[in-house]
C-alpha cells in the first residue's frame, strides 16, 4: 500500500513537472510583446469604455494611440483636451486641441406643439416603432419619445421628461460620446459645438415636408422660408429639402435668425432675457 501511494505521488509529480515545462516553452514560443506604455495611456483615460472615441473601449484606444505616429484624428470625448494632453505627454507627441461638443435633439415637437392623431400599440422602442410606424402624430420626422437614447446613455445625461414626448439633453452631464446619436432611428440627435454657458441657437426641427404640410403637423416646424438664411451674415445657415440648418462651427450666436423665424422653429437656449427697447416720443409743447 505504501509503495502504491509513493508511486502515485511520483507519477503525478512527473506529470506536473512535465506539463509545467511544456507550458513554459509554449508561453515563450507564442509570447506577444505589448508596449508598457499602453498601460500608462489607459490609466490616463477616464475608463468610461463608452466607445465615443470610435474604438472598443479605453484599452483599444490606448493601444491605437501608442501605435500611432501622431495623435491627429484621435480624441477621447469624455476626457477632452486635458486627457489627450496627458496621453500626448506620455507618448512624447502633440495632441490636437478639439472644441468640446454636446448632443442636441433636433425636435421641439412636444405634445403642445404636435398633437397626437393615432395610438401606437406595439413594442415601446424607437428602433422597432420607426421600422413599422411613422409615429403617433402627423409628423413622420419627429421624435418618437420611447427613449432609446435614454437607454444607451451611461452618463445620465438624458431626461425623458414624462408627458412632453421629447427628451432633453442635460449639458452638464453630456460627454459627447455619440451613443445617443447612433441609437436614434430618426437621426434627430447630433453633436454640436459647445459654446460658453452652454448657449445654443438651433433649428429644432427635421421635417422635410413642404411648408403647409409641416406646419399642419407641428406648429413649430421649419417651413424652409429662407428668412433666417438671408438674415445670417456668417454663412452659418443653409436651406435644403425645405429645412434650415445652422452650422454650430460657423454660428456667432448673434440671434438675428431667431427674431425673423415666423414659426419659432429656431430656438435660443441659455441666453439672458432680451432687452425690451422702447421708443421715447418727444412731447410737443402746445402751450402759447
Image (cartoon, helix red, strand yellow):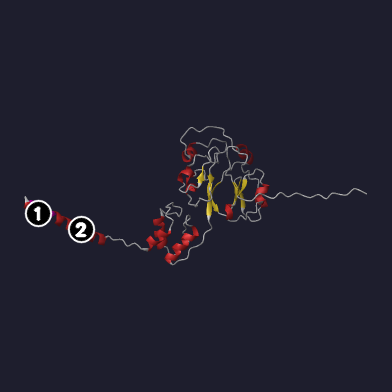
Tell me which segment is drawn in magenta. Answer: 4-11
Question: Percent position (x, y) of residue 179?
Answer: 47, 48
The residue at 42%/65% (across/down) is 91
Q: Residue furthest front?
A: 287
In the foreground, 191 or 238: 191
Q: Is residue 80 above or below residue 181?
A: below
Question: Would residue 11 appear left or right of 26 to someone viewing this image?
Answer: left
Cβ–Cβ under 8 Å for marks 2 and 1: no
Q: Main secondary structure of the magenta part?
A: helix
Question: Would residue 84 appear left or right of 251 to someone viewing this image?
Answer: left
The mark found on residue 65 in the picture is none
**Local secondary structure at mark 1:** helix
Classify residue 23 by image quadrant.
bottom left
The residue at 14%/54% (across/down) is 12
Q: Is residue 280 above or below residue 92?
A: above
Dot 2 crowding, Cα within 10 Å, few <14, some 14–19, many 20+: few
Question: Percent position (x, y) of residue 20?
Answer: 20, 58
Question: Would residue 158 appear left or right of 62 to someone viewing this image?
Answer: right
Question: Percent position (x, y) of residue 132?
Answer: 48, 36
Q: Is residue 215 visible?
A: yes
Q: Which residue is mark 2?
A: 20
In the image, which is nearer the foreground, mark 2 or mark 1? 1
Q: Is residue 210 above or below residue 280?
A: above
In the rendered structure, does residue 92 fall within the stretch colored magenta? Answer: no
Q: Which residue is mark 1?
A: 6
In the rendered structure, does residue 8 fall within the stretch colored magenta? Answer: yes
Q: Is residue 111 above or below residue 152?
A: above
In the foreground, 165 or 272: 272
Amino acid at each position: 500500500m505504501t509503495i502504491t501511494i509513493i508511486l502515485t505521488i511520483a507519477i503525478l509529480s512527473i506529470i506536473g513537472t512535465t506539463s509545467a515545462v511544456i507550458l513554459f516553452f509554449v508561453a515563450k514560443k507564442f509570447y506577444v510583446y505589448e508596449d508598457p506604455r499602453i498601460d500608462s495611456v489607459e490609466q490616463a483615460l477616464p475608463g468610461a469604455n463608452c466607445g465615443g472615441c470610435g474604438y472598443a473601449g479605453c484599452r483599444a484606444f490606448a493601444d491605437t494611440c501608442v501605435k500611432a505616429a501622431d495623435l491627429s484624428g484621435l480624441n477621447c470625448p469624455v476626457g477632452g483636451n486635458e486627457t489627450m494632453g496627458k496621453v500626448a505627454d506620455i507618448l512624447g507627441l502633440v495632441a490636437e486641441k478639439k472644441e468640446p461638443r454636446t448632443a442636441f435633439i433636433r425636435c421641439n415637437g412636444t405634445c403642445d406643439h404636435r398633437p397626437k392623431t393615432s395610438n401606437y400599440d406595439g413594442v415601446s422602442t424607437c428602433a422597432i416603432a420607426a421600422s413599422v410606424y411613422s409615429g403617433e402624430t402627423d409628423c413622420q420626422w419627429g421624435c418618437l419619445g420611447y427613449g432609446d437614447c435614454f437607454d444607451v446613455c451611461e452618463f445620465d445625461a438624458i431626461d425623458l421628461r414624462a408627458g412632453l414626448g421629447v427628451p432633453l439633453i442635460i449639458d452638464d452631464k453630456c460627454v459627447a460620446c455619440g451613443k445617443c446619436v447612433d441609437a436614434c432611428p430618426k437621426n434627430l440627435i447630433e453633436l454640436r459645438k459647445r459654446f460658453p454657458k452652454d448657449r445654443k441657437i438651433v433649428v429644432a426641427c427635421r421635417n422635410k415636408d413642404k411648408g403647409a404640410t409641416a406646419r399642419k403637423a407641428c406648429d413649430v416646424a421649419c417651413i424652409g422660408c429662407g428668412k433666417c438664411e438671408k438674415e445670417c451674415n456668417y454663412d452659418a445657415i443653409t436651406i435644403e429639402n425645405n429645412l434650415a440648418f445652422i452650422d454650430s462651427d460657423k454660428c456667432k450666436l448673434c440671434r438675428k435668425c431667431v427674431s425673423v423665424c415666423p414659426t419659432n422653429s429656431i430656438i435660443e437656449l441659455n441666453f439672458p432675457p432680451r432687452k425690451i427697447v422702447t421708443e421715447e416720443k418727444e412731447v410737443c409743447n402746445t402751450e402759447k
